[in-house]
Image (spheres, grey):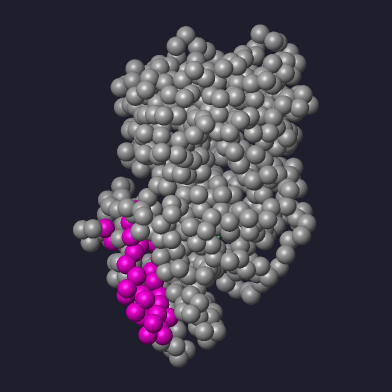
């Protein structure tokens, strides 16, 4: 019998009428002969209101009690939904996360799912009942109630779809799909018909609030197609599917995202030797704080600056940890900026960055937006800007890539096959028909390999003026020289007082890139070329949200005495640049650290 999971978000169950209308939708699927699981969020703004209430009682509510409180929101919704469905004449039963055995770790307010016992749900489904499950919550091994982090009901829904082998997971919300960017900020944003897991993972983790990024990790890991659609209309929404089903149509950029509530932290005067970056990030990872945009300057006189971003809510704790770590490693001090925002563009079509970077920087320069920091991954470019210019920056970028224009050949009525991981997923071993069984916990990190690219060179522009338009000028010149740029990083101003922009390029193009860049900056003395670099990568799913990955990677390299020259992270990959002559050794160290026998040098020439 086909099985579908339907998830209704807060606005979709805000009042009695909406609950009844969601109930009718579930009943329709039931009458079509499907088994139906309904996952619900707390009604309307309930979660926000509960958080507000807790803050009225105390400034720092204990995390365990916060979970106890927040879980009540979803419990109200499941009961009402079960009443609605039963009232309309169909058998239904509601469950809390604990009742159906969603077992998590004990990280209150950001718990991860370990496993889900399916017997009770399966029994109810087999009895012909619609099963209603509270989203966002679980229970740890000591029966403490936990929650999965804001927006976590999506993750409950996709996790249930994964363990029960549902044909699809439908996410009903207040927009009719995933848009090229948040339609509340950019009115011209357009609905996307199909998007790949990797693109959605990046967009979600870079700020597109429409999906909880961890739900997309599950979907990719277990091959669950997701259909994001409107609660209030019947039109097709957006399918989030495997890359081959997304059939990308040539455009380099698929969407743009804004993370408005970001904060930047910079550790000054960091000694440039192996192990130092590791010592810093290990401390932060221990607190389960997700960091992004890690950028390290090219060192001068044995010292460098390391900057990174965290979400605003994690700033206070991060500063405490960073200050402690700075003392430990003998760094100069810690500065921060709580008023920044991150604007990103994402697309599988940008595997080479030159043109996309140029267009993005040009758009920002044209809008008078100053770029404070830049980082890239294979499929995204992120820039850090002042929070007050964030919305303008997003609009300018959206316009520059003409994201409002429909893509060719968008097809309606698309229903992808459910692809089991073993069919195609390189993460799955021979017996991985059930990848679930293979993992210690369902949300455990999946690392599929480590790679080495020995064909990299780094080109650094020193003394970059701290004003709009500069990056665009340099990139226009590099693009005109026909050089393919891989990684791009720019940090905030160094203690020496200058800003530095580094790129990596294929070694044979390094001199050409350097002369193009110096033509743009006007002074060849301001361009530094390091031709002998290697890129080491750890590849998997959920690499950034699993805070321990980068730490384990930096730790393995530190233990081998290998210095890290540049860092670059995404949800599917963490890359570091090292000296060429340490590359192979680094590859072996990483293979051991991640317990892989699949460590391999990347084939042949660099990507073009
Ligand atoms: P729910 O309560 O149903 O989970 P959310 O508020 O979590 O709903 O997510 C839906 C909202 O996400 C939309 O109203 C929209 O403002 C916002 N959003 C942000 N980025 C995007 C995007 N790229 N596409 C669609 N919606 C987006
Ligand atoms: N109610 C929770 C929140 O508001 C979970 C969710 O809606 O997904 O974050
Ligand atoms: Mg949501």
Q: Is residue 300 above or below residue 12?
A: above
Q: Is residue 138 above or below residue 25?
A: above
Q: Is residue 408 above or below residue 550?
A: below
For residue 327, what is the image quadrant? top left
Which residue sits furthest front?
A: 430
Q: At which x and y percent is residue 380?
A: 60, 40
Q: Observer-nearest residue: 322 or 222?
A: 222
Q: Is residue 436 above or below residue 457?
A: below
Which residue sits furthest bottom?
A: 89
The residue under the point 46% across, 44% down is: 448
Task: Specify the quadrant that holds the C terminus.
Answer: top right
The residue under the point 43% across, 52% down is: 429
Q: At which x and y percent is residue 576?
A: 49, 29
Q: At which x and y percent is residue 359?
A: 73, 36
The residue under the point 43% across, 54% down is: 430
Q: Observer-nearest residue: 49 or 276?
A: 276
Question: In this image, 555 relative to 521: left or right?
Answer: left
Q: Which residues are magenta?
A: 111-140
- The stretch drawn in magenta includes residue 551: no
For residue 377, what is the image quadrant? top right
């Amino acid at each position: 019998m086909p099985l579908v999971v339907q998830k209704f978000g807060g606005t979709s169950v805000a009042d009695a009428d909406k609950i009844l209308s969601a109930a009718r939708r579930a009943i329709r699927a039931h009458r079509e002969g499907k088994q139906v699981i309904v996952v619900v969020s707390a009604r309307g703004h309930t979660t926000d209101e509960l958080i507000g209430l807790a803050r009225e009682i105390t400034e720092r509510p204990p995390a365990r009690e916060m979970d106890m409180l927040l879980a009540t929101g979803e419990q109200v919704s499941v009961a009402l939904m079960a009443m609605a469905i039963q009232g309309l004449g169909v058998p239904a039963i509601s469950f809390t996360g604990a009742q159906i055995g969603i077992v998590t770790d004990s990280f209150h307010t950001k718990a991860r799912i370990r496993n889900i016992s399916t017997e009770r749900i399966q029994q109810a489904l087999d009895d012909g009942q619609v099963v209603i499950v509270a989203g966002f919550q679980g229970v740890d091994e000591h029966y403490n109630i936990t929650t999965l982090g804001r927006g976590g009901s999506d993750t409950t829904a996709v996790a249930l779809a994964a363990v029960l082998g549902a044909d699809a997971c439908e996410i009903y919300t207040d927009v009719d799909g995933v848009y090229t960017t948040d339609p509340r900020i950019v009115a011209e944003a357009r609905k996307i018909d199909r998007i790949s897991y990797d693109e959605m993972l990046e967009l979600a983790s870079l700020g597109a609030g429409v999906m909880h990024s961890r739900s997309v990790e599950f979907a990719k890991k277990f091959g669950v197609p997701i259909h994001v659609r409107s609660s209030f209309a019947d039109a097709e929404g957006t399918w989030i599917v495997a890359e081959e089903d997304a059939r990308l149509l040539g455009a380099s950029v698929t969407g743009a995202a804004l993370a408005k509530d970001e904060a930047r932290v910079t550790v000054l005067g960091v000694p440039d030797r192996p192990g130092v970056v590791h010592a810093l990030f290990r401390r932060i990872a221990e607190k389960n704080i997700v960091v992004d945009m890690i950028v390290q300057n090219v060192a001068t006189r044995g010292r460098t600056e390391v900057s990174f971003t965290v979400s605003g809510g994690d700033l206070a704790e991060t500063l405490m940890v960073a200050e402690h770590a700075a003392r430990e490693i003998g760094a100069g001090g810690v500065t921060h900026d709580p008023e920044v925002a991150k604007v990103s563009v994402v697309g599988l079509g940008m595997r080479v960055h030159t043109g996309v970077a140029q267009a993005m920087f040009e758009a920002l320069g044209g809008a008078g937006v100053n770029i404070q920091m830049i980082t890239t991954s294979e499929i995204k470019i992120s820039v850090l800007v002042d929070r007050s210019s964030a919305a303008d920056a997003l609009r300018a970028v959206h316009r520059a890539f003409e994201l409002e224009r429909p893509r060719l050949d968008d097809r309606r009525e698309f229903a992808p096959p459910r692809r089991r991981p073993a069919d195609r997923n390189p993460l799955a071993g021979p017996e991985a028909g059930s990848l679930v069984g293979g993992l210690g916990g369902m949300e455990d990190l999946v690392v599929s390999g480590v790679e080495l690219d020995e064909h990299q060179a780094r080109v650094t522009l020193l003394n970059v003026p701290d004003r709009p338009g500069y990056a665009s000028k340099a990139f226009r010149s590099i693009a005109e020289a026909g050089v393919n740029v891989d990684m791009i990083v720019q940090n905030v101003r160094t203690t020496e007082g200058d800003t530095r922009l580094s790129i990596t390029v294929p070694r044979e193009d390094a001199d050409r890139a350097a002369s193009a860049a110096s033509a743009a900056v006007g002074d060849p003395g301001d361009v530094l070329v390091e031709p002998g670099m290697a890129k080491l990568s750890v590849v998997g799913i959920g690499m950034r949200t699993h805070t321990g990955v980068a730490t384990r990677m930096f730790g393995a390299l530190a233990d081998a005495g290998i210095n890290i020259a540049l860092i670059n992270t995404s949800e599917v990959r963490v890359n570091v640049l090292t000296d060429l002559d340490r590359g192979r050794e680094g590859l072996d160290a990483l293979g051991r650290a991640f317990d892989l026998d699949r460590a391999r040098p990347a084939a042949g020439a660099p990507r073009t």
